[in-house]
Amino acid sequence: MSYSPPPQYPYQPMPGAYGQQPGNGLAVAALVLGIFGFLVTWVPFFIGLLLGGVPDVLAIILGICGIVRANRVHRGMGMAVTGLVLGGLAFISIFLGAGTVW
């Protein structure tokens, strides 16, 4: 009875290589839109109102969705909350006169 060694494979898997962990793109989008909307909403002559209103609303929506996703993947909670707060502050400032004629 002869014993043959197991076949040798030329490529061994790298130890510790598991692929990428899931990210939180919703949180990143909320942060970017929140910063953009917060900065643009203050431009006078209704330009800020037109250019900043939509990103503010999107930052609020994506911030909420990003928080929900951050609870699942454990990534991006700070970015999602920051985007939500900046978008919310800029959206509320529209009702206080931001972006109108000064």
Image: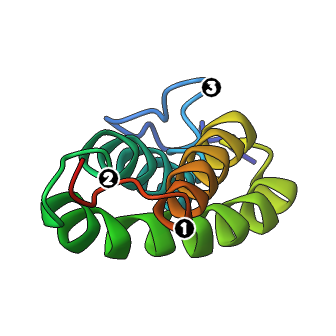
Whole-number angstrom distance, CA of label 2 to CA of label 1? 11 Å
Q: Which residue is mark 2?
A: 41
**Viewer-closest of 59 and 44:** 44
- The answer for how far apart the CA atoms under marks 1 and 3 are is 53 Å
Q: Please name whichever residue, 7 or 57, is drawn nearer the observer in this view of the structure.
A: 57
Q: As shown in the figure, which amino acid type bears the numbered disc 2?
A: Thr
Q: Secondary structure at mark 1?
A: helix
In the rendered view, would you say 46 is above or below 6?
below
Marks 2 and 3, how far apart at CA: 47 Å
User: What secondary structure is marked by label 3?
Assistant: loop
Q: Position of residue 28 (x, y in %)?
A: 46, 48
Mark 1 vs 3, N-terminal side: 3
Q: Quadrant of residue 24?
A: bottom right
Tag 2 secondary structure: loop
Mark positioned earlier in the residue sequence (2 or 3):
3
Residue position for label 3: 16
**Picture coordinates of residue 85, whole percent (x, y):** 67, 46
Q: Tell me the residue at 56%/53% (across/down).
A: 27
Three-letter amino acid code at the position of disc 3: Gly
Residue at x-position 56% and y-position 69%: 62
- Residue, far right: 71
Residue density around tag 3, few if under 14, some if 14–19, many if 20 or more, within 10 Å: few
Q: Amino acid at mark 1?
A: Phe
Looking at the image, residue 27 sits to the left or right of residue 47; the answer is: right
Q: Residue at x 49, y 27 (%)?
A: 14
User: Is 27 or 4 nearer to us in this picture?
Assistant: 27
- Comes first in the chain, label 2 or label 1: 2
Give the residue pinned by disc 1: 95
- The mark found on residue 79 in the picture is none
Viewer-nearest of labels 1 and 3? 1
| Residue 57 position in % (x across, y down) | 49, 74
Instruction: Give the farthest residue toward the top.
Output: 15
